[in-house]
Amino acid sequence: MRICRFNDDRVGIVRGDKVFDVTSETNGAAEPALALGEFLDVEKRKALPLAEVRLLSPLRAPGKILAAPVNYKAHIAEMQKNNVSPGFNIWDIEKAGLFLKATSSLVGPSEGIAQRFLDRRTDHEVELVVIIGKKTSKVDRETALQYVAGYCLGLDVTVRGSEDRSFRKSIDTYTVLGPWLTTADEIPDPGKLRIRLEQNGELRQDASTSDLLWDVARLIEFASSFYTLHPGDVFFTGTPQGVSPIRPGDRLRASSDALGTMLVEVREAS
Ligand code: MN
């Protein structure tokens, strides 16, 4: 199932180029994308053309947004070469640890990125994002995937610099989630997904999650050794190579055959 939030907080199931409105089935749940059972009669619901809806973040209010740094070898190499984040020279997740992004930075694709600090380098980072579905703590990697509700694409927008990651990556709108949540039953192996990012029609990032240094199961094991993971928690798994600066006016297109496509516009923050 592909579950989206759209327009004024409606909940929909995406099939082909249509969105079927199932808001009435979520019974006012705090996190409606996690509250749906299976539908047999989806196509009897009111349908809207996918191209005409405003996509919001599939998660409304995650308790935390976790993120992995330095999780693709080729991205580590480009960061070492470009030296754009001085002071950051730990290239091993075990030692660097994870970081947390402020939940107030979360937006959906239709809201776009409002860029601040135009004099500082700010990069797109497209990533596979894991959505936790069941509460767990100290889970081992062998069973970790049982706690996943689904997956989506994310942009971990990043101001480069010497400050703490959580500080530079938590600016309003710098966490984009979309286009919808694809439930885990449709993704038997999250280690075989191709993810891409185009900037104004030019391909910048194009990688397979088979190149993740720490795969999804190992990341969940590690995170849950520190924190209880709760339904709706969001986990960015790290960006592959090809990060590059964004500017107001840019049109970013993140895509994955398995997870869909999202268009995100960059503007100057007012
Ligand atoms: Mn990142």
Image: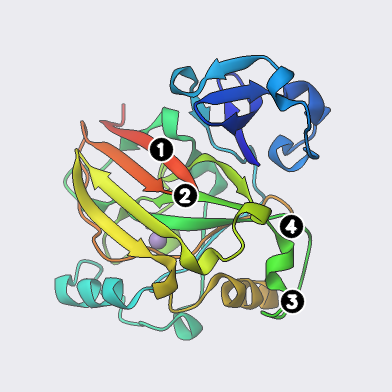
Q: Nearer the viewer, residue 254 or 135?
A: 254
Give me the residue at 35% from left, 35% from top.
264
Indicate the quadrant containing the C terminus: top left, top right, bottom left or bottom right.
top left
Which corner quadrant of the image does residue 77 belong to? bottom left
Amino acid, disc 4 = His
C-alpha gap between disc 2 and disc 1: 8 Å
Residue tagged by mark 4?
230
In space, the residues marked 4 and 2 are separated at their CA atoms by 19 Å
Circle 2 residue: 153
Q: Which residue is mark 1?
A: 262
Horizontally, residue 158 falls left or right of residue 247, namely: right
Residue behind mark 3:
139
Sequence order check, earlier mark of 4 and 2: 2
The answer to whether mark 2 and mark 1 are in CB contact below 8 A is yes
Tag shown at residue 48: none
- Amino acid tagged 2: Leu
Marks 4 and 2: which is nearer the front?
A: 2
Residue at image location 56% in from the left, 70% down from the top: 216
Mark found first going from the N terminus, 3 or 4 = 3
> Callout 4: helix, strand or loop?
loop
Q: Residues within 10 Å of mark 1 (few under 14, many from 20)?
A: many
Mark in front: 3 vs 4:
3
Front disc: 3 or 1: 1
Of tags 4 and 1, the one toward the viewer is 1
Q: Is residue 184 above or below residue 180?
A: below
